[in-house]
Structure formats: C-alpha cells, structure tokens
Image: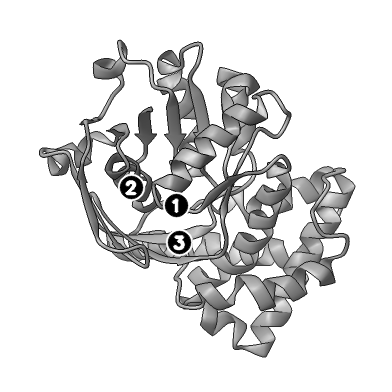
Amino acid sequence: MNILVVGLGALGTTFATLLKRSGHEVYGLTKAKYLASFADNKVYLSGIWGDHEAVLDGVHADIRPLLDNKPDLVILIVKSFDTEGTIKEIAPLVGENTLVMVAQNGYGNYEAVARVVGKEHTLLSPILFGARLLGVGRAEVTGIAGTVRLGQPEGAVPAAVCEKIAEAINAAGIPTAYEPDVYGILWDKILYNCALNPLGALLECNYGCLVDDEGIRGVMNAMIREIFAVAKAHDIVLRWNHADDYIAYFYKELLPPTRQHFPSTYQDLMAGKKLEIDALTGAIVRLGKEKAVPVPVNETVTNLLKAKELFSAKKKAS
C-alpha cells in the first residue's frame, strides 16, 4: 500500500517504521520545525517489539509534494486539538479510494474527520499500545493493553476492506484485527485513558503507582462510574453492562501489562506541550453538562490538570 502517516510522534513513528519494514511505500507528514531532523528520512524503533530502523519514502511538512500521489491509507495520529485543522489541510490528498484511519484516542476525533472527508473514507482505530518519543524520529514501545482494533463505526466501509487493512498492519508487527463494534472499543479506551492519564500526569507517576494506592483506586472507580452514567444518558452503548464489570476487567486484564507505562499526558506536561485533556475527562464534563449528569470527580480532575498545565507553563517561562 501507499501509506501516509500524519504526525510522527511516538505512535506515528511506530506505525511508520514497522509498515515501511513490512514493504509498504510510507511517507510521513510532520511539523516544519522537525523537518531538518528527517533529512535522511530515517526512523527508529525500540522497546518490547524489538529494535528496528527504516528509511521512509519521504517526510514532508506540507502536502504539496504529495498532491500527485493519492495514498491508499492515511494514518492520522495528531493531538486531538489539532485534528480538525489537520484533516482540513490534508483533505486534498483523499482520493476516491483513500481511507483515513483515525488512530487517536479520546472523544470527537472520528466525528471531526468524518465531517470533512465523509464516513465512507473514515476508519476508526483506538490505539491499545503505549510508546514514548526518545527524540525526533525515535520511539520506544513501552507496553500493550491488547490487540489494536480497526473498523468503520457506521458500516460505511465494507468489512472486507477493513479486514485487509487490519491484516496489513498486523503483518507489520502491530497486533491488529477488524472490529465491527469499533466505537465500543473506543469507549473502552476512553474509560481507560480518563481513569489513568490525568491522574498519572497530576501525580507524575506510572500506572502501577496509581493502582497500588487504595485512595487513588477509589478516585479512578468514581471516574469510571461517572463515565458510565454519561454514556447511558447519551444512549452510547458500552461493551459492559455495569461499571463494576468494567472496573474488575480494568484491574485484572488491562493494568498488569501496562504498569510501567507513563501516560502521554504526563510526557506532554513534562515537555511543556499542550495537553489533550479536553478530549478525555474534559469531554466527559461537556457531555455530562449536555444531559445534566453530574460528574464531580471528572470535573475536579480536569480542573486540577488544567491548573497544573498553566502553572507548569508559567514556571518554564520564568
């Protein structure tokens, strides 16, 4: 396939490296300030999936060099607050047979992409592995909570097409499978990220430290129960009938393989980058207000993290 990876952060670098090594034609789109670091088009990957390097077919800071080269697949892995602007920028690259894979977690990204390019060109693929950026074009895979799922939430892309793409990514070394109920999987990931990422950033610790503290577990459980209430009010069908069922699965199955992982929210905070909190607990707060569902714990955590983001920015500037 001809593949364009939009956003060469930790996750984007992982996809680009492994897909190129698997024999695909892979291009990257990054910010202009990073372009000089990709002068040789090389990307590197280390961590639990081994050490790999690859030479991409091109890395660019805008779409002009790619206008005559419609990709088969665009993998969109940018920050949630950049999703709408980015998809509008790359929309001219979306040809009749191009699919855009929204490889992002959090609420609203799929909807933003589908509004611009159409649901018939939009796939959703919640990411269930963690990675960190060691430097520009260098990533380390730190943990995996399960197989990456890929699909079209509204059935607008044939299952066979989704399966073919999932098989290609899986063959590259990223465990991936087609999932008809991919929107339910996204909400699994929203639950997981909302419970862990903001608290990991606030307390500056990995997932294992969070779950080892009884008081913090109580906070996470309350956040999860609030999210279930919000989903019910919005007629969003979760894959779990009751919050307690998910909570049991959360601690038994999801947490153990990712105990050592530091959330991307923490990594962004330490790097002085803008946080994606509005696509996580911030989105839960908004959705709760729309249906008059109280979410005091999610709202408190959101406000605390926004304050910490502001204080950290002021400290770095002084």
Q: Neighbour class for label 1 at 10 Å: few (<14), some, many (≥20)?
A: many
Q: Cα distance, mark 1 to mark 2?
A: 8 Å
Q: Is residue 294 in view from this perspective?
A: no
Q: Neighbour class for label 3 at 10 Å: few (<14), some, many (≥20)?
A: some
Q: Residue at x 18, y 37 (%)?
A: 35
What is the secondary structure assignment of the residue under circle 2? Answer: helix
Which disc number belongs to residue 17? none
Residue highlighted by disc 2: 18
Which disc number belongs to residue 130? 3
Quadrant position of residue 139: bottom left
**Relative to 170, residue 155 above or below:** above
Q: Cα distance, mark 3 to mark 2?
A: 15 Å
Quadrant where the image shows the C terminus: bottom left
> Where residue 310 sits in the image (x, y, percent)?
45, 59
N-terminal of the pair, mark 3 or mark 2, is 2
Q: Residue at x 64, y 23 (%)?
A: 119
